[in-house]
Image (cartoon, grey):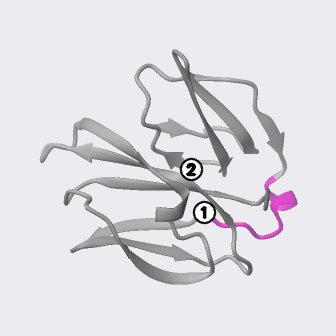
Amino acid sequence: MLENTSTLAAYRIPVTSGSRTVEIPVLTPGQRIGVVLDRPVVGPVIWLAPESLGGFTPVTADVVPGGVRYRSGNCRALTSRGAAVLFRAPDGRITGGEQLPAASVWCATGEKVLPAAVPPGSAVSPYCDLRTE
């Protein structure tokens, strides 16, 4: 898990482990997000005042029977960059994980359930980006 303990928003966060790198698009102050890497190292971050994000709120996800329910209160669709799925043991320990591809993650406005084979008790962290590229 990666946590933003700052009062600023972290933007375009490169996280590396060995030869593998993922980019977390946005992490608001106090937000935690899953990262599926062993011994992740955070690279240089762009720090922004939260009000510069124009009302952005993180997209949330919950595991439901047969899939994942995504919820977005944003006024426009964001760009999916995939999601991290952290598998948890009954006592809450992280036991593994996988990265979902961008096409399997909902970042548009509103709520939608997408089919996915995600074990119950897993945590899904959508990577939804303000950029359209």
Front disc: 2 or 1: 1
* Closest to the observer, 3 or 23: 23
Residue displayed at 49% across by 83% down:
111
Q: Outermost residue toward the left?
A: 90
Mark sitting on residue 31: 2
Mark 2 touching mark 1, by CB under 8 A?
A: yes
Residue displayed at 52% across by 63% down:
103
Q: Amino acid at mark 1?
A: Pro
Residue displayed at 27% across by 36% down:
96
Residue displayed at 81% across by 61% down:
53
Residue interval drawn in magenta: 50-57
Q: Element at badge 1?
A: loop
Residue that carries the numbered disc 1 in the rendered image:
58
Task: Find residue 1 and report its horizontal and vertical position in percent.
Answer: 44, 37
Q: Amino acid at mark 2?
A: Gln
* Closest to the observer, 5 or 75: 75
Mark 1 burial class by Cα count in 10 Å: few <14, some 14-19, many 20+: some
* Closest to the observer, 37 or 102: 102
* Closest to the observer, 78 or 47: 78
Upstream in the sequence, badge 2 or badge 1?
A: 2
Q: What separation in Å lies between label 2 and label 1 (alpha carbons)?
A: 9 Å
Eyeballing the image, is 27 above or below 1?
Answer: below
Task: Find residue 61 and report its horizontal and vertical position in percent.
Answer: 43, 66
Residue 54 is inside the magenta segment: yes
Q: For the C terminus, which image quadrant?
A: bottom right
Task: Find residue 39 and report its horizontal and vertical position in percent.
Answer: 44, 19
